[in-house]
Amino acid sequence: MALIKKFKIGDYPIKQTIIELKNISVKYNKRQILESLNLTINKQEILGMLGPNGVGKSTIFNLITGLKNPNYGEVIIDGVNCTNIPINERFTKFKLGLVPQYGGLIHDLSLIDNLKLVAEIHIREKELREQKINKIISQFEFESLLNVKGKHLSGGQKKKLVIAMALINDPKILLLDEPFAALDILTIKMLQEIILNLQSTEEISVVVCDHQARDLLNCVDRAIILSNGKIIASGSPSEVIRNTEAKNQYFGDEFNIS
């Protein structure tokens, strides 16, 4: 697949930070997961995270959402040190949206009822709820699927629905955990286009974590490669695949994105 990422947030001279992880260290049962890690994520940037299993990608998501606190360091969102702010407050105060790798919808509810359920949690006014739901239905072309139960949707349709549910609260930051896993080529391309549209039309900062390196690199502005608790490479897709350390520890010599 050729590169589909045409808009580059890096082309803009001024970058505004929306998330900063400062000198983060995390241990699980005495095992060092992240060590003195520093990461900055910019507003309206699509950032991709790559690395072997157990390297700390999901831990970074957990640190941002508040599911996990660091043993050392600070988590700063939109200029506020929120290291000790609980998960529910983070999602509402800082407008976070999360698309988990598994689940995220109620399988015995129809597509429209899944949307209504989330809307009723986040939006008090009935008229505003209906406006938001109708916008989502049009945006994701759900018209023919409204009464289909979640358990009868295809893998790609389920993923679209979970992304749509995460957008009900108008997030400023959207975290996508392995969105391309176990999907066919056409569905992956559809999701890549959705991610790009979220950046360009909704002005959302998107962080994507996936093992499908080629698919991820085809839709991000910047990628980081994690290994042994540290970021070993950071840059544009073409920069990280040329990075010697990233080749040695993750990509190998033959990997390319064309």
Image: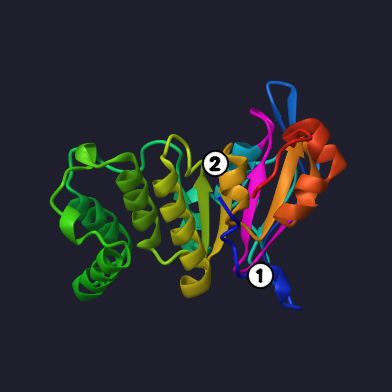
- Nearest the viewer among 247 and 150 is 247
Point out the tag, 2 or 1, that comes first from the N-terminus: 1
* Residue at the spot 41% in from the left edge and 36% down from the top edge: 102
Res. 23 in view: no
Residue that extends furthest to the bottom in the rendered view of this protein: 13
Instruction: Check the image and report above or below for 138 versus 210.
Output: below
- Magenta span includes 237: no
* Residue at the spot 79% in from the left edge and 32% down from the top edge: 249
Instruction: Check the image and report above or below for 99 versus 247.
Output: below
Position of residue 109 measured from the top left corner of the image (x, y, whole percent):
18, 44
- Nearest the viewer among 41 and 28 is 41
* Residue at the spot 56% in from the left edge and 46% down from the top edge: 215
The 10 Å Cα crowd at callout 2, few under 14, some 14 to 19, many 20 or more, is: few
User: Which residue in the protein does label 1 denote?
Assistant: 9
Q: Which residues are magenta?
A: 38-56
Decide if residue 15 is on the left or right side of residue 128.
right
Three-letter residue code for mark 1: Ile
User: Which residue in the protein does label 2 denote?
Assistant: 67
